[in-house]
Image (cartoon, grey):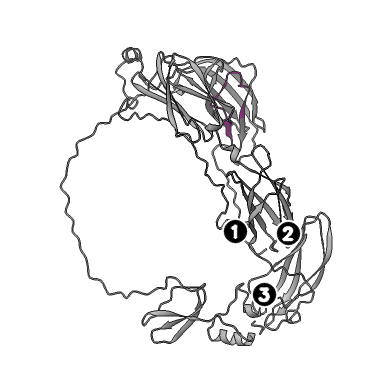
Amino acid sequence: NGETRSGEKMVSVSYKALMLKTTIPASLPVDSLKSLSIRTENMNGEFEPATIIVSITKLKEEKRLIRDRYWERPDQFVMSKAEYISLFPYDEYDNEADFKSWEKGERIFEKSDSARVNGEWSIVNGKFGAGFYVVEIIAKGKNADEVKDVQYIELFDEKSKELNRRGYLWTGIKQTTVEPGETAKIELGTAANDLFVIHAIDKATSNQQPVTSNYSFIKLNNQKQTFSFHANETDRGGYGVGWVFVKHNRFYQSIHVINVPWTNKELAVEYATYRDKTLPGSEEKWKVKITGFKKEKVAAEMLASMYDASLDQFYLHQWIKPNIWPVRYRYTSWNTTQNFSKTVSSQKPISAEDHKRLLKIYDELFNRSISYIQSVERGYYSVVEQAGNLSENITASTMNAPSADDGDARLMRLPKPVFKSEEEALEAKAKGVILPDADGDGITDQFDVSKTGQQGAEVQIRKNFNETAFFFPDLKTDADGNIEFSFTMPEALTKWKFQALAHTKDLSFGYSSKEIVTQKELMVQPNAPRFLREGDKMEFSAKIVNLTEKEMAGQVQLQLFDATTNQPVDGWFRNTFPNQHFTVAAGQSEAVKFPIDVPFLFNK
């Protein structure tokens, strides 16, 4: 269609012909490990048959509490681990805080089977308890290729009151986004004993009151505890909760937000009548229905618009619901920069004498600056030298920064050229006047047949190519919450973007967007060259497109006209087969070609 398309394909090159892709969750309830996702592929991402060997081994846990250290892992050890722990029972000796460094224990599961296209790998008869496991996966391909992957997974007992892994602080999120009348739940756990915990709730007592902090105090002793938070209408916008405690000279806190959204201020935009495909220039009548959060009837006003979606390639345009309802949550965040934090030693700076520098500046030849025109209005201008001689005519849309060799240049605005005939326009063009030619076809707009509509009266020519189909800022619902509006589709064959923004007096908002395509059931798409040379022989090609669900047959005709006189020139161009018959299957397209010769001495 005279356009350029590009595509690319990535090809991977490797010394191995097999890739192993696994999806292993980081943690699961102890009774939920039923299957794994294991897939073998070649370097191009296609399934490759292979033999899979899976083994799952339990890790030996570190049984003591380990606090974060403020220094790097040592590279030399002057104490044994037992001696170090006896002196520093809560500090890390080597790397035992990382469960991936734990020693392997008993192998719980092992299985060998063929890989499957869907990647499903079932685990049966596995006797798993709570704890940490290492999952080792080996894939062997047909070319004796072997790849291996190692993953780790934690299995936890939801009913247990103790933690899987001994740690100072653990939180489990069960539900934190709730509607008024519902209850949010957060779990808090620790493996430490005798914790004095400060519990803070930051919320407002009503919509008119500021957010305040309420504190309470709890005891935790090597346990998990579930905290429940009930939500009311006054909690819209959310509120914050948090816990903080100090243990073994370390500070721990956990802060969360109970999200209670403003769903009561959301409107739903539903489409009672709507078509995603229509004809260019068609008369449309749409109906939309506006309802509240619970599908109740509302009295609303709606802003609706539709524009050519291809404009989004240059700059994406989208309406956004006003964000006026406050986010009411805040939470108490304790600052520990002055307490229980590390301090880095500083080195005394040593001042050094500045080195000597030599600055040399050489004489330069005088260079006359060139004056450039920064911006001009769109129109027709002449570049005039100081002496007043006419240099050239230009338009603002095609003008580069003009300059003169002998003196500054300036612009003189000219009136828009209007000519009585094409001959007069051509004479002006020969004298250097640039003629208005918006589509670049070499024909002055004033005499361009494609714009004036003088030719082809028997064909319904599409004329309305507005980029905006409509803009209705003041549509109101009827008694049933419906909005009806009518419009005429522009005649461009393109995709359109419809947007609707509704609001009520109590500042509820709703937004919706749809895409609509305008197309003809039968279309002809010519593929014309941008220019021709005298004596060229060519086949003028076009594509006939059938978008209906049935076969179509008909006749296609090529007509050539002299744009300056509007007279036929089929004979000049030897358009000897101007009429052809076509048959196009449903939903398909067919190409037609017209052989023509470009005559000599036709410089038009």
Q: Which residue is mark 1?
A: 311
Q: Residue 298's image quarter? A: top right
Who comes first in sequence, dot 2 or dot 1? 1
Which mark is on residue 451? Answer: 3
Q: Is residue 47 a member of the stretch shown in magenta?
A: no
Q: Secondary structure at mark 3?
A: helix
Who comes first in sequence, dot 3 or dot 1? 1
475 or 465: nearer the eye? 475
Q: Which residue is mark 2?
A: 519
Do tag 3 and tag 2 residues touch (Cβ < 8 Å)?
no
Residue furthest to the left in view is 353
Inspect the image, locate mark 3, and give the three-letter code of the amino acid beneath it.
Lys
Q: Secondary structure at mark 2?
A: loop
Residue 132, given in percent of the width and then of the height, sits at 51, 19
Q: Is residue 259 visible?
A: no
Give neighbour class at mark 1: few <14, some 14-19, many 20+ (Cα, 10 Å).
Answer: few
The quadrant of the picture occupied by the N terminus is bottom right
Q: Secondary structure at mark 1?
A: helix
Residue sitting at x 71%, y 75%:
453
Residue 467, given in percent of the width and then of the height, sits at 63, 62
Residue 516, given in percent of the width and then of the height, sits at 69, 54
- Per the rendered image, the range of residues in magenta is 17-37
Who comes first in sequence, dot 3 or dot 2? 3
